[in-house]
């Protein structure tokens, strides 16, 4: 919305009026065309109208004015769509494209008129005019119909109006200026809050240098190093030295958001003045249970824009830590939508803690920062970055099912023939593709399909503008958003995509599959200054650099600070989880390994299996009495069930958790000290064979000959490393990690082990109990017991 640099607060005309002059309700039933396709259609309409005007019409006229304030300057700038100079005076023309029925538009939209009024004031001052007119030109993007609203003003009228707008904005400028002064002074004296652990100084120095040089950095650092503080501290210092304007801490899970909040809180306790806001998903923070964002369904949506600026100002001037609870409190006080309220709050803080999708997801990203043409001095700290590969693939892929076109066509057939016809045409296109596809078909081009989808998108947009209260709006909206996403993703397609059709249980699917998300992520990351990717499992780092950014980026490897003597790593090389060897004999051997390992010391263990089916095959070998100490992860566990599962892992207890590798318990849980003393990991974690894994394998095999590794080995090994990382969490932890698969003894896997795993031991089932017992005996007879 604005930039504040060298004591100049720059804001565009549009941003100024959309912030200060907004009013009314949130209504998601309207304005669904606000994407690239609709914007392109609007731009074409702009140019067409401008070309039709005579010589007295000047298009895209740049204007800028500066207004001194205390110790800083407000600069307002923009481009007027048109300036008409005639004998009887000057007119500012503001053109807006819409899918709305213009017969139902009785007056110009307030913020649209306000935009023209700002340009009118600037033109009067610039040319010394004593009167001026403003004209709103609305063009229907569906039928090219045009409607005008024109009004004349004296200079005194536009001056009074503009000074009121500027005055209302000035308090926000004063807040920004004062906050920045206090922030920079406090950060100047800030020091690292703890004595540096081994590796922390290396991380902090590398992060700071990366930000200073506007580069990207990958950090592979094991659990316990203190990655969060080691990245947050230098990033905050960089902001304090004007090397960044705003910090985005991006996470994949709620638990890591909490860790980030704690890190910023520690820095504040040491004197840093650094406001942060945490964004919570709309579905979670909605006061009404289910987001129905319109004034009829939600009291928080009704009149939201009338109250939200007062709510934001109250909150940011009284709170330095804006968490979910704080947002809910103020949202209730002012009766505003907590989600939209939280997004507005991010303008006025120094750091934003949020999920990946608020920066990267093309449907969800914060358009106020990352829309087309927008950029800023942003610093991105990307936590648990190994998760971003699959998340990004999902964000930038898109799929449509033939059956959904038929379903929605039946719903709208008697209501809107034009929309029904567009849906029928898409269904026909998909039917033709379906006839070509026995199982899976890879397609080079889908040009005719895209023409039909773009027409459908236009018909959908017109339909929702005309009939916002359509009875089956939810079903139709779901398909509309899927079509919109598909069109937007098609615009991104380069050689990092595969287009394919597949017969699935749900019907015939057409998919744009993003095999390499790096080019898509780059468009987002390039809108900021610097990015730091960090995780305990970025191995091999070249794989992550290629899929998340570029092989040319910096990378550092931080050694584990933990004493290797406190951890046993053993590889059982006489078993395997290969599909060809999945039989009762192998399952019995796995059971014997588990029993041998867990019998040597009373405590809590986790066993990670390659699938639910494999886990159940081993579990059923246990007798009823043996099952008493075993708790099993179930499919689709609720949050409460997960908590109950983890509550069993407390010091002094003796239980064995059967879990799935890559599931909710193999990552992001923190069982310290004696809460967990061992992990047994069955298999190499490789994903199950499916269409997309085969496509990934083929793509990377052609690209650089690493197809199998990119599709299977590396993603699987990451899951193994994450599961193993549950055991040793602090300097005081003692524990064992047992890898059960002969493939772990081969060079192809050993080369993927972290450096601290160089002391691994190869064992057979006959040796396992003795090796584990010796380890625990050595721990019990440690220096403290000699």
Image (tube, rainbow, N blue to C red):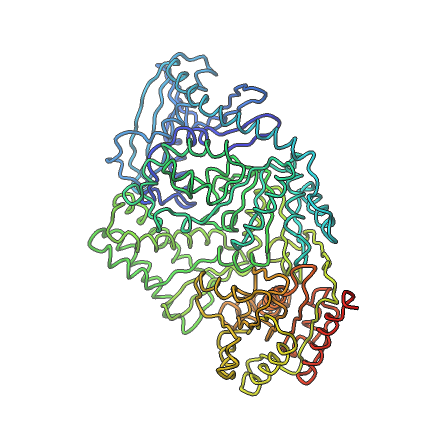
Q: In which quarter of the image is residue 378?
A: top right
Q: Which residue lies furthest to the bottom in this view?
A: 585
Residue 310 as seen in the image, left or right of residue 544 = left
Q: In which quarter of the image is the C terminus?
A: bottom right
Q: Where is residue 163 in the image (x, y as percent from the top left)?
A: 43, 19
Q: Where is residue 13 in the image (x, y as percent from the top left)?
A: 46, 28
Residue found at x 38% / y 71%: 505
Residue found at x 42% / y 73%: 439
Front position in the image: 611 or 532: 611
Residue found at x 45% / y 64%: 641
Q: Residue furthest front?
A: 785
Front position in the image: 501 or 75: 75
Residue 209 as seen in the image, left or right of residue 689 = right
Compared with 482, 579 (above or below) is below
Q: Where is residue 384 in the image (x, y as percent from the top left)?
A: 59, 56
Front position in the image: 505 or 435: 505
Please give the count of numbered marks on the rendered protein.
0
Front position in the image: 709 or 320: 320
Q: Where is residue 747 in the image (x, y as percent from the top left)?
A: 71, 73
Compared with 772, 291 (above or below) is above
């Amino acid at each position: 919305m604005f930039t504040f640099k060298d004591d100049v607060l720059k804001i565009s005309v549009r941003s100024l009026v959309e912030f200060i002059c907004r009013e009314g309700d949130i209504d998601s039933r309207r304005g669904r065309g606000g994407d690239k396709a609709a914007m392109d259609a609007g731009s074409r309409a702009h140019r067409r109208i401008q070309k039709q005007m005579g010589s007295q019409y000047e298009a895209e006229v740049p204007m800028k004015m500066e207004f001194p304030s205390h110790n800083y300057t407000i600069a307002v700038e923009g481009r007027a769509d048109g300036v008409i100079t005639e004998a009887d005076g000057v007119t500012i023309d503001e053109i807006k494209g819409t899918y709305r029925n213009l017969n139902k538009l009785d007056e110009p939209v307030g913020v649209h008129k306000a935009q023209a009024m700002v340009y009118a004031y600037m033109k009067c001052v610039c040319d010394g005019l004593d009167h001026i007119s403003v004209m709103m030109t609305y063009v229907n993007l569906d039928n090219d119909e045009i409607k005008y609203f024109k009004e004349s003003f004296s200079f005194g009228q536009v001056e009074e109006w503009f000074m009121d707008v500027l005055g209302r904005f000035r308090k926000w400028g004063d807040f920004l200026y004062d906050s920045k002064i206090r922030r920079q002074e406090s950060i100047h004296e800030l020091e690292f809050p703890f004595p540096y652990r081994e590796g922390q100084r290396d991380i902090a120095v590398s992060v700071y240098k990366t930000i200073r040089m506007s580069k990207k950095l990958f950090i592979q650092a094991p659990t316990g190093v203190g990655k969060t503080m080691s990245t947050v501290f230098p990033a905050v210092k960089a902001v304090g030295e004007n090397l960044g304007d705003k910090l985005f801490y991006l996470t994949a899970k709620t638990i890591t958001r909490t860790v980030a909040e704690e890190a910023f809180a520690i820095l504040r306790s040491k004197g840093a003045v650094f406001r942060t806001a945490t964004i919570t998903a709309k579905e979670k923070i909605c006061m009404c249970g289910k987001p129905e964002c319109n004034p009829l369904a939600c009291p928080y949506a009704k009149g939201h824009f009338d109250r939200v600026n007062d709510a934001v100002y109250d909150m940011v001037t009284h709170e330095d830590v804006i968490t979910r609870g704080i947002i809910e409190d103020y949202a209730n006080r002012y009766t505003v939508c907590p989600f939209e309220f939280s997004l507005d709050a991010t303008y006025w803080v120094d750091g934003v803690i949020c999920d990946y999708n608020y920066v990267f997801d093309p449907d969800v990203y914060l358009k106020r920062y990352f829309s087309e043409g927008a950029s800023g001095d942003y610093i991105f700290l990307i936590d648990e970055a190994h998760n971003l590969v699959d998340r990004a693939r999902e964000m930038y892929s898109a799929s449509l099912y033939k059956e959904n076109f038929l379903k929605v066509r039946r719903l709208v057939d008697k209501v809107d023939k034009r929309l029904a016809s567009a849906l029928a045409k898409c269904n026909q296109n998909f039917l033709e593709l379906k006839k070509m596809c026995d199982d899976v078909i890879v397609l080079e081009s889908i040009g005719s399909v895209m023409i039909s989808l773009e027409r459908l998108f236009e018909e959908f947009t017109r339909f929702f503008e005309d009939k916002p209260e359509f009875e089956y709006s939810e079903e139709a909206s779901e398909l509309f958003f899927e079509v919109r996403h598909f069109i937007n993703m098609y615009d991104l397609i380069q050689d990092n995509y595969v287009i394919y059709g597949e017969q699935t249980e749900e019907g015939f699917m057409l998919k744009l599959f993003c095999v390499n998300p790096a080019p898509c992520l780059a468009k987002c990351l390039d809108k900021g200054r610097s990015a730091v990717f960090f995780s305990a499992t970025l191995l091999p780092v070249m794989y992550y650099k290629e899929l998340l950014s570029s092989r040319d980026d910096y990378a550092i490897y931080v050694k584990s600070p933990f004493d290797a003597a406190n951890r046993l790593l053993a590889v059982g090389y006489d078993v395997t989880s290969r599909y060809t060897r999945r039989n009762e004999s192998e399952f019995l051997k796995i059971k014997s390994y588990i029993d041998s390992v867990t019998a040597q010391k009373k405590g809590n263990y986790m066993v990670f299996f390659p699938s639910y089916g494999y886990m159940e095959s081993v579990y059923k070998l246990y007798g009823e009495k043996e099952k008493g100490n075993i708790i099993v992860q179930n499919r689709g566990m609720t949050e409460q069930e997960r908590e109950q599962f983890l509550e069993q892992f407390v010091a002094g207890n003796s239980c064995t958790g059967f879990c799935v590798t890559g599931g909710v318990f193999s990552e992001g849980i923190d069982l310290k000290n004696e809460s967990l003393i061992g992990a047994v990991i069955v298999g190499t974690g490789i994903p199950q064979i499916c269409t997309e894994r085969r496509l990934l394998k083929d793509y990377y095999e052609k690209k650089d000959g690493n197809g199998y590794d990119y599709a299977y080995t590396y993603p699987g090994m990451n899951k193994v490393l994450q599961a193993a990382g549950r055991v040793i969490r602090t300097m005081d932890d003692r524990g064992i990690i047992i890898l059960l698969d002969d493939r772990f003894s081969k060079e192809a896997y050993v080369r993927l082990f972290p450096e601290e795993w160089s002391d691994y031991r190869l064992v057979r089932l006959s040796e396992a109990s003795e090796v584990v017992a010796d380890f625990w005996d050595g721990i019990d007879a440690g220096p403290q017991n000699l």
